[in-house]
Every structure is written in structure tokens, then in C-alpha cells.
Amino acid sequence: LVEVPLGTSIKTVVCGAGRGGVDGKTIKAVQTGGPSGGCVPYSLFETPLDYDHMKAVGSIMGSGGLVVMDEDTCMVDTAKYFLGFTVEESCGKCLPCREGLKHMYDILNRITKGQGKTDDMATLEFMCETIKATSLCGLGQTAPNPVVTTLLYFDSEYRDHIDKSKCPAKVCTALISYFIAADKCRGCTICMKQCPVNAIAGKKSFIHVIDQNKCIAC
């Protein structure tokens, strides 16, 4: 917990007081202000932490919290995570928030499972604009922020998930396949014994293989 003057840059807080990335990993973004805050990329870390500048980059000051994300973070999964919180918090009084957020969450969930469609990004953008403009309270009006900013600043990650069925951060397990390198396998059977779903087969001293139909990408 640190206290800094209003207007201090994100970089000063994260890389100064927070001492930067863990284990030397590259910082990708920071999410500000709680679950309804936007995700600000590292390229904008010189942005001052105040109400007007946060609004200008698509985020909010909110609770004053900062969630720092590095190269091991999937921004699509991150948007889904924060949206999942606001879906649960919606009081259900107005239709845009009650149904719109659920529908957006379902789209993001499909994308992280490799079932994304070519028009999903455009649909999400339209829904974000509509929900922000028509929701009755602050929750619905700010809930789309994580989706808006990840679509804006990390659109390539969405395209990788949708067009290539690939998660660059290797977070979305439905898009990951594991294989045993034939030139390195010694047939020691250790992996076969450790597999929780018996997806690995092979005899001792012979090359083992993974049954992709059984593998749960654990």
C-alpha cells in the first residue's frame, strides 16, 4: 500500500514503488480502479494517475487499486475475468447490464475456448458502446471498460485466439496441445505415471505418446 500525489505517473508507481516486474518478466499492462477499470498498456505508463487522464485512456481511478500484468497474462482471459465479477454484481434492474454483460461474457468465454467467430470483436465493441450508454447506474456504465481497452490496445491477442486458435500467453488451456518430443523421450515412464487421466501411453525404454482426445492440458 503506497500513497503518492495525484498525478504521479503509472510508471513511477509500478516500476518505482512497486519495483517493476517479478523475476525480470516484461510488464504488459496495468488495470486500474477495480473490476470496472480499463487495462492500460505499458506504452502508456507515463500517463498521470488522475481522474481526467485515466478517463482519457479508457480507465477509471475507482478504488485506487492497480493490478499489474506481465507477459504470462492473457488479455482476453483477463477481460473475461473482470467481466465475470461485474456479471455477478449486477442488480438485474436494467436490461443492458443484466443481459448484455452476460452475453459479452459468453462471447469472451467462447473465444478463450477456441470457438471465436470472425465478427465477435465487432459485436463486443457494439455491445460495449450500447451498455455504457444505456445502463442506469455506474456499474453497467463502467463494466465494459476491461473489454473496451483490451480490444483497443491488445486486439492482436483477440485475433490470435479467433483466427489462429492460439493463446500467446499460454493461459487458455483449450488452445494448448502437449506433445512428447521423440528425440528427448527416454521411456522412463515417469510422465505416464503422473498423468491424472491416463492420457500417456508407452512401454519402458520406448517413446511415449499423448492421446490428445484424453489430455486435459493440465
Image: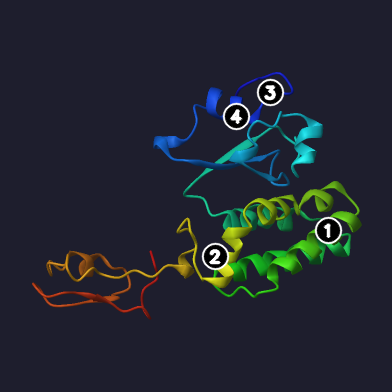
The mark nearer the N terminus, 3 or 2, is 3
| Circle 2 residues within 10 Å: few <14, some 14–19, many ≥20 | some
> Label 3, on which residue?
8
> Can residue 48 be spotted in the picture?
yes
Mark 2 residue type: Asp
The mark nearer the N terminus, 3 or 1, is 3
Looking at the rendering, which quadrant does residue 29 occupy? top right
Could you give the CA–CA distance between mark 2 and mark 4, rounded to whole angstroms? Answer: 28 Å
Using the image, tell me which numbered label, if any, was put on residue 11.
4
Q: How is the image coloured?
A: rainbow
Of the 4 image quadrants, the one containing the C terminus is bottom left
> Label 2, on which residue?
160
Could you give the CA–CA distance between mark 3 and mark 4, rounded to whole angstroms? Answer: 8 Å
Mark 3 residue type: Thr
Using the image, tell me which numbered label, if any, was put on residue 129.
1
Q: Residue at x 17, y 77 (%)?
A: 202
> Can residue 92 be spotted in the picture?
no
The mark nearer the N terminus, 2 or 4, is 4
In the visual, does 97 lie left or right of 218? Answer: right
Mark 1 residue type: Glu
In terms of depth relative to the viewer, which is nearer, 190 or 111?
Answer: 111
x%, y% of residue 78? Answer: 60, 53
